[in-house]
Structures are given as C-alpha cells and as structure tokens.
C-alpha cells in the first residue's frame, strides 16, 4: 500500500494536476476536482486515470474488414473514488460521436490520449456511474521498437494484442493493469466470418448479412488483456478436464508452410498439436501454481505475418503463426502464455516497472515444462545462460536492471527481463530449497489472485515463507547491473 502512494507521489506532475488517488482530501470537504489524467505509473504517466475505478466494460461493436472501420458503443460502469468534476478515459485516435453519463449527454473533449468527460453534474466519492461512448473509425496500429502491436488489420479481418497499452486504440478504457474489470464484447462481422474475444461464447446470431458474436468474461481483467479476432476462423468449442475451451484457428494455416526449404510439418498441424495439449499444460501448471484462475480457455492463431509475438490475453492467448513451426517450441510458448494466466492476468502488476513478475515467472514455467517433457532441467537452463558469453547473450543482457528496466518496449520486454527473470527465480530456489520455493510460487498466485502486486511485496513474501533474509539476492539479481556474484565473470570463449 505504501508503495502505491510513493509511486503516485513520484509522478509529481500528476499530483500537481490534482490527483485524487493519493491526496487524502477525497471525502466531503472542498469542491469536486477533475480526476487525474494518469493512474500514477511513472513509466507511462498518462496511462489509466485517477478518481474512479471501472467495474465493467460492455463493448457493442461492428467491424467491417472491407473498410477497416470499427464502430459502436462502449458502456463503462465505474464508481468514483473521489468527488469528481470531470474525469478521463484513455482513447487513441477514432472519432467520438457522443458521450453520456448516466444517460445524460456529457461535455467532452479530446486531449491527446485523454478523452476528458464533464458529467452533467459532479460525481460524489463512491457514486456508481455509467459512461456511454459512441465512436467509430479505423483503429490505429501501434508501432514501436519491437514492431507492430495493438489493433492489427489482417487480410480478412483484424487481431488485437496490445501490451502494455493497446486497449485505448480500440475502446475507451482506464488503460492500466491496476484497474481490472469484467468485460462483455459483442462484435458484428460480415456473415461468414467469426468474431472472437475473451471468456465464454454466449451465442451468435445473424441479421441482414451481419453475424453478431457475444462473448462474456466475468473474471476481472486488465484492459490490455482484452482481445478481438475477426476473420475466417475454425472456431472449436469443447470441454477438456472440466474446462470450457474455445480455440480459433485460421483455416489458411492448414496449408501454410513456414519454411518451404526444409521438410517440416505445416503450421496448421503444429497448431493442432500444441492446442491439443492445452488441457494437459494447464493441468501441469496447476500442480505447481495452484488451481487455474479462470473458467474458460483456448487459443487464437491467425495467419497474419504482422503479429510477431504472443500475448496472454485473458482466458484465450493469441499467438503469432511463426511460433508453430516446431512442436516443442510451440508447446513451450503455449505454456508461457498459460503461466501468465496466474502471473500477469490473475495476479496483476501495480506498476509496469515490475514486469519481471510477469515475464520471469512465465519463462520459469517454460523451464518446468521442458523438465516435465524430459528435455532439460531448470538447473541446466540456468547453467546454459550463465555460461554464455556476453557476446552470445547480447552486449546489454547483464546491464539491464530487470527490476526497473525502463519504459521503452525494447527495455520492458528485453530478453533479460524474461531470462534473467527466470534465473532470479532459480537463484531463489537454490537459496531457499525446493519446498519453500514451490510454496512461494503457489502462495504468491493464491494469496494475490485478482490483486495487484509489487516486487517489494514479492521479496517480503519470499522472506516470510522461507524465513530468510533475501535482500542481497534480489538486489544483485534485480537491481544491480552486471553478472551477479557467483556466476563466472565471463564465460570461456566458445570452443
Ligand atoms: N507478454 C508478451 C509475452 O511475453 C509479450 C508482449 C510483447 N509486446 C509487444 N508490444 N511486442 O508473451
Ligand atoms: Zn510473457
């Protein structure tokens, strides 16, 4: 809790603009104030907003692949956390047609990524309210040092994978993982196409050449984890190990040869193989991490070459097609994205700074899966990385302080965040022993399910469970540039 206040205070600019998040004067007293334009994350000072908390997003949309236009109404149910004269939603691009608060037309303006809304009358602290935003336009695809992300237009539709903040490019949101909400998505698409999102499929119906697909996700999720996939998909609904699955696989992958030079399986075959093991992978992760935190599952694979990564979109990860060139690699990626359902989705970041709590844990899950498959052990994975030369690892691998890697996406998602992150967990395991280590992993997921966390809380939790002082270990592994002590200074040059 103190951590959160400190973080907000650190974003001095926000405090200066009158945030209600940390300043104590939320109750009765003075005049209602505008909600802060950011939630208080120093990495992305304008992401999320202050003064309210979203409870539910209802997205009623239509997407036309012929024009790339997305149109519809987002209904955001929230409650005020301070007296509010106005408040913001995050929205990038798109054309706003009207905004209502509790059914009454509201005054609004656009200021960069902020949609500033002044309700008919001020909102009181704790008051529940509903915002309806009607909008349309061609969603902008995000471009950064790692390539493109967010709302990606494909040959027959679109796919959405927007971490850390792609939600605002397709719906008005409090776009920060600190504010999770349940989400209903209804998307109308030309008859013959599928529209896929998170959670469970409630139904689909066709009217005048448009098919509406209705998805519902009751378990709160961070906005960046909301996905949408429109196009021709083979939508496979089934139950396995008591869990409801919806897989959406682009039928074009059946004949997609990722590497015509060599004689490998077709991508579609590897997709079928890897998605066919999902229930088994979830069962394996449950043995280590505790019960799967959600009530639905599945995977989305489109044939677009433009999506170059995978994302742990809640209950239904989305994958780049190139992950499915090799069956073992594909299983490892599926394991990684499911591990995020515990670490990242159910247990959420309070600050993007602590991204290693997502990526280090998901990478460690990969190591556990490789061991389960008899291919290597976590110790071998650790040793392998530890003995690679700086040249082999990339010059800055040991220079990234993964406990605070920086906001540029190529720092936030630097390979060190993943691999040094997993090594950090292995160093912890070596220090505290297997019993304490697995109690920590599982207890962390169980005791923080549905909550946000920080690295400081993880260190305190690990110390409490193990009964050891771990400051030195985490300082060396997370916050100190260079190879942690105990590792070879510089690996021997490869023979
Ligand atoms: N969390 C994702 C994963 O590790 C990576 C997201 C990368 N984001 C990006 N914009 N490239 O599975
Ligand atoms: Zn990941």
Image (tube, rainbow, N blue to C red):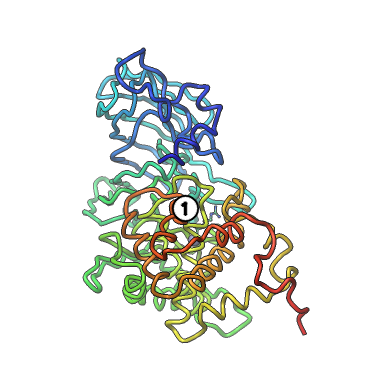
- 244 or 396: which is nearer to us? 396
Residue marked by disc 1: 161
Q: Quadrant of the N terminus?
A: top left
* Residue nearer the viewer, 236 or 471: 471
At 30% from the left edge and 64% from the top edge, which residue is drawn?
A: 292
Query: Above or below — where is 134 with respect to 494?
Result: above
Name the residue rendered at 50%, 85% in the picture.
Answer: 375
**How many numbered discs sit on the rendered protein?**
1
Residue 197 percent coordinates (x, y): 34, 53
Q: Residues within 10 Å of mark 1 (few under 14, many from 20)?
A: many
Residue furthest top as drawn: 31
Indicate left or right for 298 with 430 as reference.
left
Quadrant in which the C terminus is drawn: bottom right
Residue at the image point whose x is 36% and y is 25% from the top: 98
Q: Is 59 drawn above or below residue 125 in the view shown? A: below
x, y percent for residue 29:
32, 14
Q: Is residue 204 left or right of residue 312?
A: left
Task: Establish if 189 lies above or below 114.
Answer: below
Q: Is residue 115 left or right of residue 288?
A: right
Residue 454 appears in the rendering:
yes
Q: Which element is circle 1 on?
A: strand
Nearest the viewer among 46 and 75 is: 46
Q: Is residue 176 above or below residue 108?
A: below
Q: Residue at x 33, y 19 (%)?
A: 119
| Whole-percent x, y for residue 289 in the image | 35, 67
Answer with left or right where residue 259 lies relative to residue 170: right
> How far from the left and from the top, in percent, is residue 291?
28, 66
Whether disc 1's CB lies below 8 Å from ligand 1 is answered: yes
Q: Is residue 216 visible?
A: no
């Amino acid at each position: 809790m103190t951590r959160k206040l400190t973080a907000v205070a650190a974003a001095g600019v926000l405090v200066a603009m009158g945030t209600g998040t940390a300043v104590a004067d939320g109750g009765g007293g003075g005049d209602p104030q505008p909600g802060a334009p950011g939630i208080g994350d120093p990495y992305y000072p304008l992401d999320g907003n202050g003064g309210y908390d979203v409870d539910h997003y209802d997205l009623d949309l239509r997407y036309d692949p012929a024009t790339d236009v997305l149109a519809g109404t987002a209904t955001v149910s929230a409650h005020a956390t301070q007296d509010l004269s106005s408040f913001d939603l995050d929205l990038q691009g798109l054309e706003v047609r009207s905004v209502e608060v509790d059914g009454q037309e509201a005054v609004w303006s656009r200021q960069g990524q902020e949609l500033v809304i002044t309700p008919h009358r001020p909102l009181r602290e704790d008051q529940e309210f509903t915002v309806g935003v009607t909008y349309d336009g061609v969603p902008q695809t995000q471009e950064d040092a790692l390539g493109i992300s967010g709302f990606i237009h494909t040959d027959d539709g679109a796919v959405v994978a927007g971490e850390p903040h792609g939600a605002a490019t397709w719906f008005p949101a409090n776009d920060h993982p600190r504010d999770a909400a349940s989400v209903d998505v209804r998307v109308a698409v030309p008859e013959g196409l599928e529209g896929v999102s998170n959670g469970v499929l409630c139904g689909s119906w066709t009217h005048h050449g448009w098919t509406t697909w209705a998805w519902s996700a009751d378990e709160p999720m961070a906005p960046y984890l909301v996905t949408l996939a429109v196009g021709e998909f083979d939508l496979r609904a089934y139950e396995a190990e008591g869990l409801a699955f919806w897989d959406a696989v682009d039928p074009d992958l059946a004949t997609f040869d990722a590497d015509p030079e060599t004689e490998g399986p077709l991508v579609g075959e590897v997709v079928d193989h890897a998605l066919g093991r999902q229930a088994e992978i979830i069962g394996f992760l449950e043995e280590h991490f505790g019960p799967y935190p959600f009530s639905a599952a599945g995977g989305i694979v489109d044939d677009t070459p433009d999506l170059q990564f995978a994302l742990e979109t809640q209950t239904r990860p989305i994958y780049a097609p190139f992950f499915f060139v090799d069956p073992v690699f594909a299983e490892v990626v599926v394991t990684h994205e499911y591990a995020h359902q515990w670490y990242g989705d159910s247990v959420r970041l309070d600050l993007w700074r602590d991204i290693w709590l997502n990526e280090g844990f998901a990478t460690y899950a990969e190591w556990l899966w490789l061991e389960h498959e008899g291919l290597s052990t976590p110790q071998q994975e650790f040793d392998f990385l530890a003995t690679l030369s700086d040249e082999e690892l990339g010059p800055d691998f040991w220079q990234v302080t993964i406990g605070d890697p920086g906001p540029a996406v190529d720092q936030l998602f630097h390979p060190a965040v993943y691999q040094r992150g997993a090594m950090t967990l292995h160093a912890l395991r070596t220090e505290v022993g297997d019993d304490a280590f697995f109690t920590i992993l599982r207890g962390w997921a169980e005791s923080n399910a549905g909550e946000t966390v920080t690295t400081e809380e993880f260190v305190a939790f690990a110390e409490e469970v193990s009964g050891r002082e771990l400051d030195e270990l985490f300082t060396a592994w997370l916050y100190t540039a260079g190879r942690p002590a105990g590792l070879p200074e510089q690996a021997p040059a490869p023979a």
